[in-house]
Image: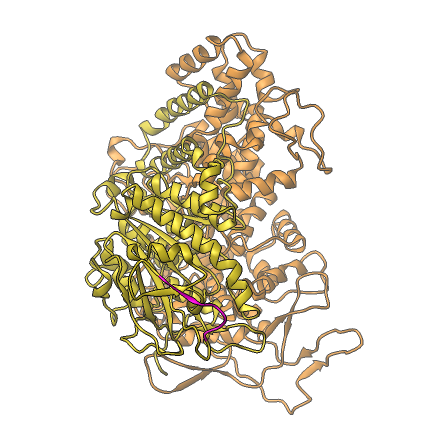
Amino acid sequence: MKTFHTIIALLLSISAHQLVGQDLHQIIDQQIEQASTEAFAEQATDSEFLRRIYLDLIGQIPTTEEALQFLLDPTKDKRSQLIDQLLLDPRYARRMTEFFNVMLMERRGEDPNWQTFLSTSFAANMPWDQMVRHMVSPDTNNKTTRGSGYFLTKRLEKYGQNPTDFPGLARDLGRMFLGVDLACAQCHDHLFIDDYKQADFQGLFAFINNTYIRQDTDYPAIGMKPIKVKVEFNSVFEEGTFSTGPKLPGLDEISVPEFVTGEEFAVPPNNDTKAPGIPKFNPLDYLAKQLPNPSNDSFNLNAVNRIWFMLMGRGIVHPLDLHHSDNPPSHPELLTVLGVQFAEHNYDIKWLIRQIVLSKTYQRTSAITPPVERAKRRDYRVFSEKPMSAEQLMWSMLTATGQLSHISPKAAVPESGAEQPLEGQVDNTLEAIRTDFLAAYANPPREPETEFAPSVRGALFVLNGPRVLSWLPPKAGNLADLLQRQKNNYADTLFLSILSRNPTPEEAQHFNAYISSHVDKTKAIEQAIWALLASNEFAINH
Amino acid sequence: MPHSKQTHSLCTPEEHTLSRRQLLGASTAAGVVGLGGLGGLVNPLIASDMSAKEKQVLFIWIDGGMSQLESWDPKPNTQFGGPFRSIPTSIPGIQVSELMPKTSQIMHKLAVDRGVSTFDNSHSAGVPRINRGDPKDRGVVYPYFGSAVANLMGPGDSGLPPYVWVKPGSGGFKYQDAGFLGPKYGALAIGEGKPPPNILLPSNIDQQQNLERNALRKFANKQYANARAKTFREAQDFVFDTAQVLMDRRTLFDTPDASDIERYGDTPLGRDMLIGRKMIEAGVRFVKVNSYGWDTHGDNFNAHASLMPRFDQAFTAVVEDLDQRGMLDHVLVIAMSEFGRTPRINGHIGRDHWPEAWSIAMTGTGIRRGAIIGETNDEGTWVTSEPHDIGHFFHTWFNALGIDSEHTEYINDGQPLPIADEECSPIQELLA
């Protein structure tokens, strides 16, 4: 780690004097463009930008009206206006909640208190360091934020026949907040990654190996047993026994104080209320101070790298949790500037997102033309296609078909307005819809969703599942209804509503001819809607 | 600290495969298609290059531990022999338990090793350990045999997933078997004989309409494909094509003929074995058929009196069917548990877990039929011949499938890993 930090410090001194007086989005473009002598792709078309920015900032494609409004708007800086508008949209908090829930919990499960923590934090634009402080050391008195404890408690739950996975929790602290996966350094210094030391893993482990899930609360809450000794460990390769107290990589070890037996607790356990004791020494308090801290480079770099990944489709360090000297950042100086400025701006997530999406780098087309044929994802010479999450697909299909206004608010009863109930009754509550989409598209628990991984399961869901098929037939105000009322030019509305763009002349001709040539226009319209929903262009954020 | 065969809680498979893929920059279609566990539908172009592609495996997993004393290696009239007699078989001088009368008649078509000696006597550790061939601990999670075969031999050209698991209970896409090979080499599980979700075309879409909507979809894909890299869209096209193959082959999931059910037995194992045979006939590379409920710590003898005839009937029927169709020439059939059961009879008239001395049966491609090898002592407590660990069997089966197990390695995150325990070797007496 030492070498690594020295490099960062070095880079930092270079950037400081070069980059004064520029907005971060300009620095991003300058850094990306000076790193390559090759050509860069053109800026994205308005339609391409529109779809991308909606998906990235509010987690769904634009409605037909939203798309038309933007595309017809002659204002010169309409892109930055749209960015600012979407950052204020209530759906922004929903999107961030969905993205960060998947990233931080990796589909381990759901908890309403956790959802409340995330959604209220993003709605209020809570700084990232504060959010992390809540996650590693929850304030149980704050009803709005205390669901943050789920990050720790869920990982302490046993699953299958496995024992409580303390090593897994230690590993995830490193992965999620420091960008390092120390898993293979649990039992020995990492075999292939010189920077990853067994002592780093064990130091993280010592923060959490005495935690437990409190049973006396109706929200996820973490308890801490009194700590009397350091963590002792052996290496499978080296002789001898080593020990460590809680310690973050690159920082000093926290000394474990000694207490006379019976004096460990600030508040002793209460047998009547079942309230657990609060020990005088709680390593999580130290973690909350040391981890989300402007002086903690790894924390800063990991945070910006993950937000960059969310928007750009590839981390400057990639994989996101393998930051080490043999897997260096593609643009080290840029990563450093991002990290420093993010910390300087008090970890303002909206500010960082706004700067990135304002950049030309973000606004490049993903279409490949001869000059950029050999571009690699790590160059950012072309915009990288991104997978859509189960949630993005759900909201987008709901939006495209016009089904969004037909969701039953609560009760799991079939919709009365449905003209063609399909294959039995379909529960039209949002919860039921969400369950179906997660079953079809989400990864199994504990697998990061960072790669494009389409599944046969997902294809069968679109091909034959009653969920999406039941959204196709006409009902008041939905897409099929709208199309049915049109005489011959179906394609414009069809493409605008589903793909957020106008059709090419060839596409318009093909789809118009298809619908016109069928006696059963309604069925043909449903077929056309389905074909675009099932298309690759729809399934990819490009 | 001894380098024991323990399992690490970390070093799970995905980070190794992901980091390998990404660090090496390899992004072929096969590399990025995560099929939600739909067992390694690797790029068909790659698959067609593979040798020995016609060989298949029917793997019958008897979960909980079949008693060798009530099946392949009876010890009647001994201290631990239990109440059942032994009967002669189609091989002179070889006897099996009277609980497998049908099997006794096809003994000459089988190979049985009665000298199996393995190392784990708990289900939780034993099941995965045996299924993985108990390799040395290298800090990675090894694939189950089915995932291993799916990876090493590919899906073949049936268009079907390479690893199908027919089982009681839930179906779906089970990625866990794949270990470090990654979720795409997991199993497509058929639970209770039911097909994967959404495999049936809804009744209000006819075949013509299905063709038309997919033609429209493909047309729509053209414009996008014009200017985009292949990786994403090829992966996306591929899952739709595979979904269509499963839809086209949905008769595989139809209710079997009454006469077949009668021959295989109207039992969960009988019905699942029939589906297993159909999957093999349809060209699936590796089919696992699962029977549960063999952990007879209590009332072992009544339990086996009830369980064994179901196995006897289904197993014999499938071997006979494959033989009659000439399919034993290219299908390897294996029947086994995670361990045998204790010769000593416990206080609940049960038998406990006994990895020290048990039996595995097999037949089909590459196997010497009629080879009944290995011996236990008179009380069935210990192996008196050369003991064979599960690693020996993995070597044997890989060789029966035409894979040189001693010179083939997985490469995982730059780390070469032997496909079978390098301290074991093929059992030549079992190989044809």
The x, y position of residue B110, in whole percent, is: 30, 57
Residue drawn at the location 32% of the way across and 63% of the way down: B112
Which lettered chain is shown in orange?
A: A
Q: Give the position of the C terminus of chain B as an image quadrant.
A: bottom left
Quarter residue B136 falls in: bottom left
Residue drawn at the location 57% of the way across and 66% of the way down: A156
The x, y position of residue A59, in whole percent, is: 54, 39
The x, y position of residue A515, in whole percent, is: 48, 12
Colouring rule applied to residues: by chain
The answer to whether residue A170 is above or below residue B203 is below
For the question of whether residue B171 can be seen, the reply is yes
In the current view of this chain or complex, which residue is farthest to the right? A272
Quarter residue B290 falls in: bottom left
Q: Residue B197 in magenta?
A: no
In the current view of this chain or complex, which residue is farthest to the bottom? A260
What is the count of numbered marks? 0
Q: Give the position of the N terminus of chain B as an image quadrant.
A: bottom left
**SS assignment for the magenta stretch, majority:** loop
Q: Which residues are magenta?
A: B81-88
Q: Tell me if B289 is positioned left or right of A445 in this view.
A: left
Instruction: Please identify which colour was used for chain B in the image.
Output: yellow
Q: Tell me if B29 is positioned left or right of A45 in this view.
A: left
Depth check, front residue: A65 or B94: B94
For the question of whether residue A447 can be seen, the reply is no
Q: Tell me if B296 is positioned left or right of B320 in this view.
A: right
Residue drawn at the location 67% of the way across and 23% of the way down: A418
Depth check, front residue: B51 or B263: B263
The answer to whether residue A36 is above or below residue A168 is above
The x, y position of residue A177, in whole percent, is: 49, 61
Depth check, front residue: A508 or A443: A443
